[in-house]
Image: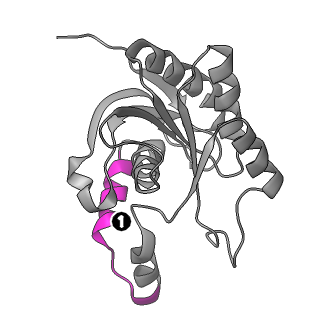
Amino acid sequence: MEEKKIWYFPQSGPDNTLATLDIALERAKELGIKHMVVASRSGDTALSLEKKAREVDYSGNLVMVTYHAGFCGEDSISFTPSRREELEKKGVKIVMSSHALSGVGRSFRQKFGGVSIPEIIAESYRRISQGFKVAVEIAIMAADGGVIPTTDDVISMGGRGKGVDTAILLRAAHQNSFFDLKIKEILCLPREEKT
């Protein structure tokens, strides 16, 4: 049996971002984790992760996952071409993808009502925290994008809107093999969600 520490933030939100990144990097180095996934709309959080990774000499695979084109309306993309170039120059891989836990099901719900099974799963994960749901979802999206393996443990980080406040250790899976996904550790999360 092992005893491990879980960090709890008083509330969700971007104020927890730097601490979440520190906690995740520390655990990644302890366990020799080679892949880290972070949710980032504009690329700010991904850049913060890359900077902190350099500071602590972590040389693993850094992956940013963001919304698909059009999520915020029309054909818009959530970050600028110059931000993409900056991230890629620093070695951060970028995945733009439909949400694994809603995707096309959201379109049907919006048009016809009802709810899809992936949205029920998403809502269940939100009972732990919004960031927990996001961390699971982006790991699936990164695996589907081919930038992380489903054979190694990874650390995945999510939050609510801006920044990250939840980090988990998991074994990712593709959408078509969702039941192979294994959550192994919760590293940090908020006790209360800001509304």
| Residue 84 in picture, x, y percent from top left | 74, 51
Identified at 72% across, 42% down, the residue is 87
Answer with left or right where residue 115 lies relative to residue 146. left
Q: Quadrant of the N terminus?
A: top left
Q: Is residue 13 above or below residue 96?
A: above
Identified at 50% across, 24% down, the residue is 24
Answer with left or right where residue 99 lies relative to residue 105. right
Instruction: Residue 14: name its quadrant.
Output: top right
**Mark 1 — residue?**
119
Number of numbered discs on residues? 1
Identify residue type, mark 1: Glu
The answer, for residue 190, to whether it is visible in the render is no
Asked if residue 114 lies in the magenta stretch, the reply is yes
Residue at the extreme bottom:
112
| Residue 78 in picture, x, y percent from top left | 70, 60
Q: Which residues are magenta?
A: 111-127
Residue at the extreme left:
1
Q: Residues within 10 Å of mark 1 (few under 14, many from 20)?
A: some
Answer with left or right where residue 60 lies relative to residue 87. left
| Residue 37 in picture, x, y percent from top left | 51, 39
Residue toward you, 99 or 172: 172
The answer, for residue 103, to whether it is visible in the render is yes
Q: Secondary structure at mark 1?
A: helix
